[in-house]
Image (tube, grey):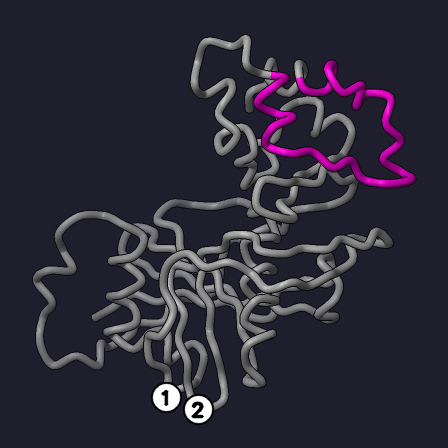
Amino acid sequence: MNNNSWKAIFDKYNIYEHNFDNEPFYITNKMIKDATKHFNSTSEKEVRILCKQDHRKSRPDIFIKKGLFLLPVKNGKYVIIKGEGYIDIPDITSKTFKYESKLEFDLDTSKIGNSEMQHLDFAYASSIIRTFTEDNTLVLTIRGKKYTPKFSFYVEKTLIEVESVQTEVDAGYEGRNNVVLIEAKNSTTKDTIIRQLYYPYRQWSEYTSKNVRTLFFEKRYNEYLIWEFKFKDINSYNSIYLYKKAKYSID
């Protein structure tokens, strides 16, 4: 949470007095480095670490107290904004679907390790992803880090402009009519920052006229859990809602 580092940042730039009800506060990598250069620990002054706030509880205390969250808007530039930046990942209490893998042989290599990507790859190879999305034409086409084109959106009534921000999806699949983007975890997640779903959604919506779908995926013990989120308004960060969810175990 790096409370001491963010206190130093807020002190140096008098952010405590900033009126977030009127406008957000823009901050750069250089500003963060200048305010934290007196710290000895890398974790207290590394910009990447200080700006990684993927869950509500991973925010520093001052952010939680004032109802703030952080968004990247350009390479080396962030915005501190007031509002709800996160979406709940509700537990799936419905019946587990007993799923028979479409593979006709075992995948020995998928049993080695415990990474998010290997679980997602196994779910795809077994056709769980195609089953959940009801799209048998999906093939893997997207993986790794890319930079966004320029786009703008609203956080409540505040206009935010984004350009050349690095994004990463754990896997992206394209079919005849759909592009499916997946954020994967291998442990229980209570909430996640909307940005992880929204930025790739906006990015790929610029590049294709196909239906862009955003999924959140978890491997939990021997079950595969999938949530699909949609946005009521492509230009509204907070228009996200849960569309459907399901969990599977593989026979």
- Dividing the picture into quadrants, the one containing residue 30 is top right
Q: Secondary structure at mark 2?
A: loop
Q: Is residue 16 magenta?
A: yes
Is 93 or 26 nearer to us in this picture?
A: 26
Asked if disc 2 and disc 1 are in contact, CB closer than 8 Å, the reply is yes
The residue to which callout 1 is attached is 137
- The magenta segment: 9-35
What residue sits 86% from the left and 54% below the top? 157
Specify whether 212 is left or right of 77.
left
Q: Where residue 250 sits: x, y (%)?
A: 25, 68
For the N terminus, the quadrant is top right
Q: Which residue is mark 2?
A: 176
Q: In front here: 91 or 39?
A: 39
SS for tag 1? loop
Picture quadrant of residue 229: bottom right
Task: Report how far apart the C-alphas of labels 2 and 1 lie in the structure.
Answer: 6 Å
Q: Is residue 91 left or right of residue 15?
A: left
